[in-house]
Image: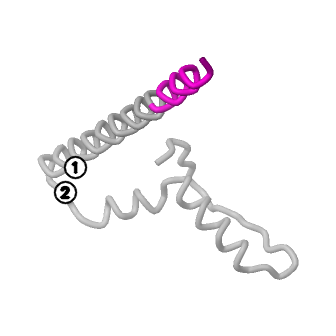
Amino acid sequence: MRNNYRPGGLRVEVHNGDFNKALRKFKKKVQDDGRLQIVREKQEYTKPTEQRKRAKAAARSRHLRDIRKKSLDNKKLYWQLIQKSIFCICKW
């Protein structure tokens, strides 16, 4: 969620009668503005322990995603080095 929430309305113009494209743009604006997230959060009361639990789970998933990405980068680098070394050996 971006922190650029501004009170007021969102506006999307329909060009050449292309309502579907305008609707997609509107949905994207609403999502970027964070209004839908705020409405969902305020629909029901969540206990502070539940909020901490969700935040901790989100942080854990972000951390695991970063670890997987770094691991994948290391594997790519490893295979690139192996391919270069095989190429150098075959060159001799």
Check disc 1: other Cα within 10 Å, few if <14, some if 14-19, many if 20+. few
Answer whether residue 9 is magenta in the image.
no
The front one of 90 and 18 is 90
Instruction: Answer left or right for 40 relative to 15.
Output: left
Instruction: Answer left or right for 16 relative to 84.
Output: right
Indicate the secondary structure of the residue bearing disc 1.
Answer: helix
The front one of 50 and 63 is 63
CB under 8 Å between discs 1 and 2: yes
Mark 1: which amino acid? Arg
Q: Residue at x 30, y 36 (%)?
A: 63
Who comes first in sequence, dot 1 or dot 2? 2
Q: Which residues are magenta?
A: 79-92
State whether residue 61 is above or below residue 24: above
Please provide percent x and percent y for residue 73: 45, 33
The front one of 71 and 85 is 85
Q: Main secondary structure of the magenta part?
A: helix
Please provide percent x and percent y for residue 45: 21, 60
Q: Quadrant of the C terminus?
A: top right
